[in-house]
Image (tube, rainbow, N blue to C red):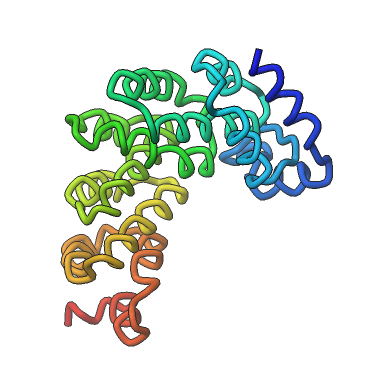
Amino acid sequence: MVHGVIVKELEQRADAAQAKILSGFFKTGKGQYGEGDIFRGIKVPVIREIVNKHCKTVSLDEITLLLHSVYHEDRLCALLLLVRIMSGADERLQTKIFTLYAKNTRYINNWDLVDLSAPQITGVYFEYRPREQLYKWAKSELLWERRISVLSTFWYIKKSSFDDAFAIIEMLLGDKEDLLHKACGWMLREIGKRDQSVLEIFLKKHYTKLPRTTLRYAIERFEEPKRQVYLKGTFRN
């Protein structure tokens, strides 16, 4: 089985010192968002090498097994395999990949796993399909499904289509999770790179509801005088 070969290669590239660093970086302590996650200690470029080696021969069933691993890097490898396969998939295979992804969101349980997969999987899948599922995820009790919802819109933002991003971000303005504040701010900043005027309209409309972190991320690329105007809210004077 290709699954066994991939796992063996991941085991061989493990690094205990790096695993300790990653465990701290991804907040795996008690009560933190990544509580209980286990790392092998493998850097992303190494995982991508393994993905490139096996993406043409691995099956979706084997990828599912990999996604169910207790090891963070195994799950990332599974998701990057799905991204790679999705990029050349026909409509039928796209549906299979999306179904696998949607059924296993509980294993897509850290911000890097979401960010490196959602735009290229759920974003791609819903490009020419109704997007109700993204809005359902935005209301989910699961933090990572809410992040999948907003990160999926990155695919459309890159194509200068902002409506879904604005709508989902508006739904998430009252979210208590800092990881969602950052994700929303990031997507707003990406919108601003393409059309600062529409971003400013959104910021002014929702200014009193914007979490401070979201605002700071959104205006990061503004000229300093304008950035200060938004930080201080003096545009309302």
Nearer to me, 30 or 90: 90
Residue 217, compared with residue 178, is above or below; it is below
Q: Which residue is drawn at 75% across and 35% down?
A: 40
Quarter of the image with the C terminus in it? bottom left
Q: In which quarter of the image is the N terminus?
A: top right
The residue depicted at 55 percent of the width and 20 percent of the height is: 63
Q: Position of residue 49 (x, y in %)?
A: 64, 40
Residue 75 falls in which quadrant of the image?
Answer: top right
Up the image or down, 212 lies above or below 107; here it is below
Residue 8 in picture, x, y percent from top left: 76, 24
Q: Residue at x 63, y 45 (%)?
A: 44
- Quadrant assignment, res 199: bottom left
Front residue of this view, candidates 19 and 225: 19
- The structure residue drawn at horizontal position 31% and vertical position 37%, both measured from the top left corner, is 124
Tally of marks: 0
* Outermost residue, bottom side: 225
76 over 56 or under it: above or below: below
- Foreground residue, 119 or 72? 119
Q: Position of residue 91 (x, y in %)?
A: 28, 23
**Where is residue 67, by image quadrant?**
top right
Q: Position of residue 186 (x, y in %)?
A: 39, 58
Q: In this view, does 48 lie above or below 182?
A: above
